[in-house]
Amino acid sequence: MTTMTEASVREFKMPDVGEGLTEAEILKWYVQPGDTVTDGQVVCEVETAKAAVELPIPYDGVVRELRFPEGTTVDVGTAIIAVDIAGGAPAEAPVPAPTEAAVPAPAEQPQAEQPEAEPKPQGRQPVLVGYGVAASSTKRRPRKGPETVSAQAAQAIQGELNGHGPGAAAKVRPLAKPPVRKLAKDLGVDLATVIPSGPDGIITREDVHAAVAPQAPEAPAAPAPVPAAPAAVAASAPVVTFDGARETRIPVKGVRKMTAQAMIGSAFTAPHVTEFVTVDVTRTVKLVEELKQDKEMQGLRVNPLLLIAKALLVAIRRNPDINASWDEANQEIVLKHYVNLGIAAATPRGLIVPNIKDAHTKTLPQLAEALGELVSTAREGKTSPAAMQGGTVTITNVGVFGVDTGTPILNPGESAILAIGAIKLQPWVHKGKVKPRQVTTLALSFDHRLVDGELGSKVLADVAAILEQPKRLITWA
């Protein structure tokens, strides 16, 4: 590691991009030693336990050293990059190639053989949170895991794959789409060692899985042929494999790690009680269709979730004690006079629960707009840490997966969570006759330390009554 003694060198430390976070994983480096950076330019992307965040550098200069490779989890407050603000040449750092290399060039390669680095565009506006595309043309090197082959070996392999000599491999980047690169990263596979099978030499998911699958050892010569087992015996014990591998191990980190810790803490701290109610929501389904034609709702997200969210807000208004939290340190029940409505969202990075701030103050069109923004932002992976903080009550819509309902676990710090089951056409007694009606099952879990059975039952019954007779939204709100 290069020793930084010059007064002009500044070290940028891993910041706490959320309240109380202690670590973050470096996902991508957008710069390399020798690159020129400007104040506000994004230099790397990190993943915290809550979201992915792009980090801008706070000064101008030349990158001297990257302290950690991609894939490393770094404690908050630890220096991750060193920048010479005087603009001097990097110490003991190789000059970067103009294009992204499959593997770094050997440090002892003669300086004359390295082409000049491409100029970097200036004026990059920082994107503090999410997955905004960096405008800088700076390239990054792929991660080297503990099982990555040496630079010379990887160059030789890649050169053979592309029909060139070993020296040409360092200038060729393996072709793969972002999801495939993510898969390779999770499995610890160096794409430079993967044999592509897709068109134009593109690496596919199957290629990555094949690189992970253990190679079958050569069978030793048997002294005598072994009699084949009877067909009935052979067929009774099949060996099933998927993609050629017996199992895949995925590191638990980032959002999934935080979710697991939060759920364990919630389940073993707050005494959960779950109550259920099955309700005829035919009128609610009809109202949804009518609202879709309303000019005030045009272009907004209108679905049963919208009306269920509004029904829960009305129920909380009628039963405000449900909107509270338990303060263990001070032995107090904290009543919240505002509702930050959380909506559980399944994303590729795991389950997150962003919330709509002050949802109790929003009209139906405003609530629809907020729900639409929340869902689209979560699907794009751009949910900010701030959007997932301060929730007071949560809705989880498990019905979208086709299940009737579930027993949801409380989001830490909250006292109630409502699960919505699938809405299905079922036989139902309506006005004394059995008719096909739209029916769903709701489940409300609550913290029994501060919510007793009566209060929890009232809230659940109010939500059900509104969904059965949506006109109560007008009279009760």
Image (tube, helix red, strand yellow):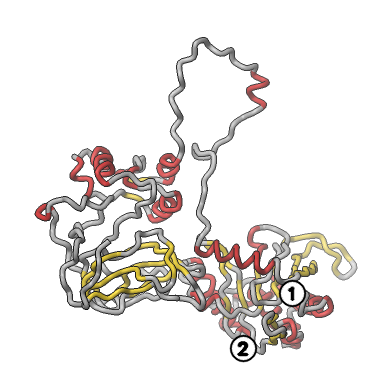
Q: In terms of depth relative to the viewer, which is nearer, 335 or 288?
A: 335
The residue under the point 46% across, 68% down is 23
Residue 156 versus residue 268 in the image, above or below: above
Percent across and percent down for residue 421 are: 71, 64
Dot 2: within a 10 Å radius of its alpha carbon, few (fewer than 14), some, or many (20 or more) residues?
Answer: few
Percent across and percent down for residue 46 are: 41, 67
Residue placed under numbered mark 1 in the picture: 447
Percent across and percent down for residue 175 are: 31, 49
Residue placed under numbered mark 2 in the picture: 361
Res. 289 in view: no
Q: In terms of depth relative to the viewer, which is nearer, 439 or 321?
A: 321
Residue 215 versus residue 292 in the image, above or below: above
Disc 1 is placed on an element classified as strand
The residue under the point 31% across, 43% down is 201
Upstream in the sequence, badge 2 or badge 1?
A: 2
Residue 80's quadrant in the figure? bottom left
The residue under the point 25% across, 63% down is 2
* Quadrant location of the N terminus in the rendered image: bottom left
Dot 1: within a 10 Å radius of its alpha carbon, few (fewer than 14), some, or many (20 or more) residues?
Answer: many
Q: In terms of depth relative to the viewer, which is nearer, 372 or 390?
A: 390
- Amino acid carrying label 2: it is Thr
The residue under the point 78% across, 78% down is 451
Res. 458 in view: yes
Q: In terms of depth relative to the viewer, which is nearer, 67 or 6?
A: 6
* Quadrant location of the C terminus in the rendered image: bottom right
Q: Left or right: 62 with respect to 42?
A: left
Q: Nearer the viewer, mark 2 or mark 1?
A: 1
